[in-house]
């Protein structure tokens, strides 16, 4: 089974994330949307809420699993028998950052390949930090997230 792990904080999960998952579905037998938990950071939205929103979004899609994890993504991949990490790229800055991580992951575990999908142009400006700022300041972020907050 070809399983990809799509890691991130997803705080919140955006329409850009949704687009990457939709486009990756034909490539893999299973995609695990894995919410990374950093003990040093507190999420804007609770982990439970983020998991629930994503599960509700994909409740009819049997190829999607939603989970959370702590530690290295490559360790999580190994534990879940996944040989692929799925990442979305919006900008050249994303590419430089993600390339470095992918190369380090490859050095630590050459059996795990990172697969990059370039975001659709209409989603390039959308990121979770901006969405959180809109919500924090009472703005309407409904155009950028695929569920009701």
Image (cartoon, rainbow, N blue to C red):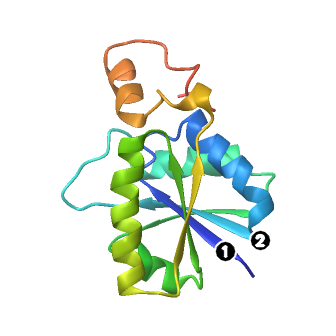
**Residue 2 shown left or right of residue 147 in the figure:** right
The quadrant in which residue 86 appears is bottom right
- Asked where in the image residue 43 lies, by quadrant, the reply is top left
Q: Could you tell me residue 146's position as x and y percent? A: 63, 32
Q: Mark 2 points at which residue?
A: 29
What residue appears at the point 35 percent right and 66 percent down from the top-left corner? Answer: 101
**Residue shown at 18%/58% (left/top)?**
40
Q: Disc 1 to disc 2, how far (Cα)?
A: 6 Å
Q: In this view, does 66 lie above or below 131?
A: below
Residue 62 in view here: no
Residue at 44%, 39% (x, y): give it. 91
Q: Are marks 1 and 2 in contact (CB under 8 Å)?
A: yes
Query: Mark 1 sits on what residue?
Result: 3
Nearer the observer, 116 or 5: 116
The residue at the point 63 percent across, 47 percent down is: 20
Where residue 144 appears, as percent x and y from the top left, is 55, 25
Q: Is residue 106 left or right of residue 25?
A: left
In depth, the one of 111 and 76 nearer the eye is: 111
Asked whether the viewer can see residue 68, the reply is: yes
The percent position of residue 87, horizontal first and vertical second, equals 52, 56
């Amino acid at each position: 089974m070809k399983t990809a792990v799509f890691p991130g904080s997803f705080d919140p999960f955006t329409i850009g994330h949704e687009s990457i998952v939709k486009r990756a579905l034909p490539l893999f037998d299973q995609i695990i949307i894995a919410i990374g938990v950093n003990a040093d950071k507190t999420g804007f939205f609770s982990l439970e809420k983020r998991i629930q929103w994503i599960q509700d979004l994909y409740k009819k899609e049997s190829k999607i699993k939603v989970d959370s994890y702590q530690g290295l993504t490559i360790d999580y991949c190994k534990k879940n028998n996944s040989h692929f990490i799925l990442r979305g790229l919006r900008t050249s800055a994303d590419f430089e950052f993600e390339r470095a991580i992918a190369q380090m992951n490859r050095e630590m575990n050459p059996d795990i390949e990172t697969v990059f999908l370039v975001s659709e142009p209409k989603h390039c400006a959308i990121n979770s930090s901006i969405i959180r700022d809109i919500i924090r300041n009472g703005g309407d972020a409904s155009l950028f997230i695929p569920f009701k907050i």
